[in-house]
Structure formats: C-alpha cells, structure tokens
Image (cartoon, rainbow, N blue to C red):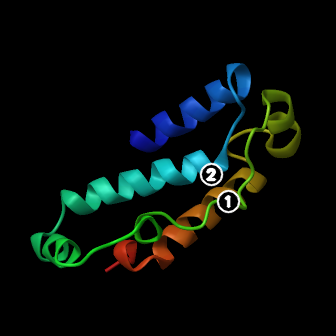
Amino acid sequence: MADAIGVYKEMADARHGRGFSFADLAADRAGTRFGELLSGAAPRLDALLDKAFSDGDLIPLISDLPESISAAEFRRQFGNTGSPAYRQLTTEIERRLDALPLYKPE
C-alpha cells in the first residue's frame, strides 16, 4: 500500500507539482523498508539500535536518479508504470536498497 501511495504522489507531482522524482520514490521505498524492519524481528532491531547509523545506512545514493519529470515527459520516456523502462529504474532502486547492510534480504 505504501508503495502505491508513493507512486500516486509522484504521478500527481508530475501533473501538478514539481514533477515525477525517482529520487523521492527511492526515499519512499527506503522509508517503507525501514518501517518493515522496525516491525520485524527483534534481534535484527536490537542489532540496529546498538550502533549509530547515518543517512547512508538508511537510504542509498539517489542523486543520479531522474527528477522533475513532467507528465508529458514521463509519458514520452516511460509510457506508464508498467513499462520496461520504468521497471528498469524501480528494479535499480530495489537493487540499491538490497545492497545496504540494513536491508539485505535474510
């Protein structure tokens, strides 16, 4: 549900706001993953809270992801959220999240 809301918000931004942002989408996904971690296994949460962590531990590099994409430009580049081009970027976001020690699949 959180993922769908994040995509909806970005599509609304593309139409009426500052544009679709894959960086914002990545931040949304990182927040969802962190929330899942907090509601998950206690030992993993204890290990997390035993050490200091930084922004880089919570969210991967996002500065190179496309941002400020208008609705027309989104349609031209990606068509829709089911297109291979869109899926390629969202898969890359998931790969980056999976690479962070905090979110590595167990």
Residue plotted at (69% across, 19% down): 16
* Residue 97 point in image, percent of width and height: 49, 68
Label 2 sits on a secondary structure element that is helix
Q: Where residue 23 is drawn, which disc sits there?
A: 2
Residue plotted at (15% across, 69% down): 41
Q: Give the spatial CA distance, label 1 vs label 2.
A: 7 Å
Label 1 sits on a secondary structure element that is loop
Q: Is 26 positioned to the left or the right of 74 in the image?
A: left
Q: Where residue 20 is drawn, which disc sits there?
A: none
Residue 93 in the image: above or below residue 81 = below
The residue type indicated by label 1 comes to Ser
Residue plotted at (39% across, 52% down): 31
Q: Is 35 positioned to the left or the right of 30 in the image?
A: left
Report if the CB atoms under discs 1 and 2 are less than 8 Å apart. Answer: yes
The residue type indicated by label 2 comes to Ala
Give the residue at mark 1: 63
Q: Is 55 positioned to the left or the right of 43 in the image?
A: right
Density class for disc 1 (Cα within 10 Å; few <14, some 14-19, many ≥20) is few
Which quadrant holds residue 14? Answer: top right
